[in-house]
Amino acid sequence: MDALNAVVLLANFVLIPALAYGSQLALGALAITLIFGILRFSHFAHGDVMALGTAVVILTTWGLQSAGISLGFLPTALLALPVGMAFTIAYLLVADRMVYKFYRKVRAKPMIFVMSSLGVMFVTNGLTRMLIGPSEQRFADGARFVITARDFRTMTGLDQGLALRSTQVLTLVVALIAMAVLFWFLNRTRSGKSMRAYSDNEDLALLSGINPERVVLITWSIAGILMVLAGTLYGLDKTYRPFTYFQLLLPMFAAAIVGGLGNPLGAIVGAYVVAFSELGITYAWRRFVGFFVPEDWVPAGLMQILPVDYKFAVTFAILVLVLLFRPTGIFKGKVL
Amino acid sequence: MNPVLRSFFLFSLVALALVVTGFYQSWTLALTILNMSLVSAVLALGVNIQWGYAGLFNVGVMGFTAIGGLAVVLVSADPVPEAWRAGGFGALLGLALGVATILAAIAVWKRMPAGRGRVVAMIATLVIGYAVTRYVFAPAREAISSVNPATEGYLGGAGLPVVLSWPVGALFAAGLAWVVGKISLGLRSDYLAIATLGISEIVIAVMKFEGWMSRGVNNVSGLPRAVPRPVDLQAHGFVQSMADRSGIDVVEVASIVEKLGYAALFSVVLILLIVLSELALNSPWGRMMRAIRDNEIAARAMGKDVKARHLMVFVLGSGVCGLAGAMMVTLDGQLNPGMYEPLRFTFLMWVMVIVGGSGSNWGSVLGGFVIWFLWMQAEPMGRAAMEFLTMGMADDNWLRVHLMDQIAHTRLIMMGAALLLMLRFAPRGLIPER
């Protein structure tokens, strides 16, 4: 019984939150890795474009809410997703046309691309703040829980409750669908195959008649969809604040690098590695240990390896380990 | 135009802009902008050493600036003897143990033969070391924090003159850069960017939450001044006679004299750095660095150790950033870890270097002045522009109200546009590298 309680406790505070957080990171990291694989640069404006796209979703959601439209127990934001996606794709394409296309034409060094993405980052950041302001916004509605802690306790008779929030379930479901569709697209469709070919060997792909501009267009579109999904799910599950989204840049990049830059499967695995270590290392293990050892053995401290404030340090430590011992990532990514 | 003449012309324009600010807004504002411009110019020089000389992409300028600022507290704040008695020994021992753990883990990894045994031994070293460190450190930390928490609750500094903290700040930043560079140089160039981005967030987190060292989010205020404070200056005969003769209020004269004092100090540092950078850039060392930047493979073929040179330049540039960070905290007179934000402390520096001219020392300095001026003046300028755009609307028109509320954010868009336009149409910057 104690063991069961311990497992439930762990699931409630570490496993399920990490699964949700990891899925959100995975969607963002997938977009980073795709952009890297096709356009061959690190997209530093990622967090800010995510914030902008999510801001559009939030504004649309508020519009729908005030018009009295809702999705019942599901959050209204799901209805607003297409608007946000269309906006983000258009925004990315405009940025590509105005900024990146020129450097692609002159075959500039990757660092120049990165530098120009800093410029896009600044502009995007300013636009987001003008649109929705720098402060925190809440836009979640619908049912809050699938199972509340109390219901779980009465249902199973255990001491520990397991609260399953609807946003967590939603995140998992949406992320799984998105990943499945993405892999189907990359492996089965003509466009997806041409993307992979282009990423693998640009010159050979051009020789076999693949239109590079079309590949770039598809890449930005997929990236836009993934970014809005990641941003909206993160905002629903936690909170929306533009600066938090900027800070997500680090775990998302870490996930992509840990998995191997340019490798989609790697990005997903990397995201879960980052999420589980972040939550596992900042979790206070005292109560968990309490189930297994006699009461007077339980140490007085919280048994937290690092305080929550240092969650970036965890991400960074994983990144450093990978850079030191396996710079190509868990799965072999592109290494230049 | 002759490049020297062109630089002279551009710098005169900046001076003119500052003078206009002085006449039309206030001299205090003009001098405030000037002082931060000088600090920004030093920072831009640091970034330029990394990017312009060697093509290294450091996205963690904020972290190196912040750790330089921490040095000011550790060097110049008054020591808190009670806190030292309560947990000073434990804290130092804990730090030493932490460092020893990492060194031991590295030694295990290097000395033992490859295989599963090595991995297990290294992890065991880290786990045991962590537990021991924590056992020593945690109580000391608690003890220090509980000493007079409202005003102290930290170990304090060494109580030395504040100017001494500038080189110390440079050393701190250089040390941090050595560790980061050792790990991430020699790999893909993007990896350095991500690693520096990460370390800068961690430095800020440490400063915010390690209260025993920096008082964390409670800020350390009232740091010693490099120049007498205005209140003391007011009593000075020279200031009083200045006020009498010019007819300006004595309080304002004192504040202007104080700011001029800082400007003089900062100018000395900046000029020294420019001279050193120019000498370095035109020496055989500078030529080697440019050769490495422009063609790494050829440089390697000529027998240059690219990774070692990159590490050297990275450490040097970060050291300059640390120096600027210490100067900034000295100017503010307080350390406030919450004020560090990446857009302002990392990415704005990049705009300065790109706009000024990457690889050109004078260009970076000019970029520092121009961009900081625009950054400070963007709000009044944006307000005027918005007034003009929304002229036809009623005062309570929702769009006008919304736009007026958001004016502060237009400067971000302006900076981004400046960066993009320069990068696209004048990639060599305002004062190109010769």
Image: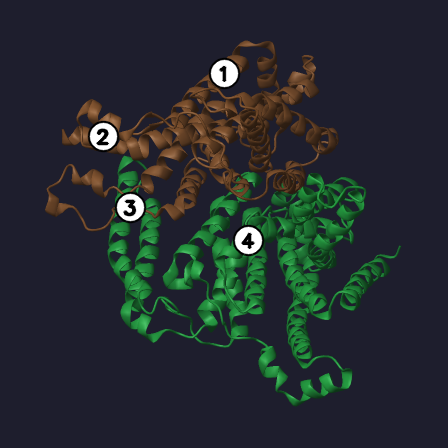
Q: Which mark is residue B62?
A: 4
Spatial distance from mark 1 to mark 3, Cα to Cα?
A: 38 Å
Callout 3 secondary element: loop
Q: Nearer the viewer, mark 4 or mark 2?
A: 2
Residue under label 3: A304
Q: Chain of mark 3?
A: A
Spatial distance from mark 4 to mark 2, Cα to Cα?
A: 41 Å
Residue under label 2: A7
Q: Which chain is green?
A: B
Is A198 in front, or is A247?
Answer: A247
Spatial distance from mark 4 to mark 1, Cα to Cα?
A: 39 Å
Q: Chain of mark 2?
A: A
Mark 1 or 3, nearer chain start? 1
Badge 2 vs badge 1, beta-carbon distance below 8 Å: no
Residue under label 1: A183
Q: Amino acid under label 2?
A: Val
Q: Nearer the viewer, mark 3 or mark 4?
A: 3
Is A23 in front, or is A317?
Answer: A23
Quarter where residue A202 is shown: top right
Q: Is residue B189 toward the left or the right of residue A237 in the image?
A: right
Horizontal and vertical percent for residue B187?
A: 52, 40
Spatial distance from mark 2 to mark 3, Cα to Cα?
A: 18 Å
Q: Amino acid under label 3?
A: Gln
Is A30 in front, or is B130?
Answer: A30
Callouts 1 and 3 in the same chain? yes
Q: Which chain is brown?
A: A
State the quadrant of the C terminus of chain A.
top right
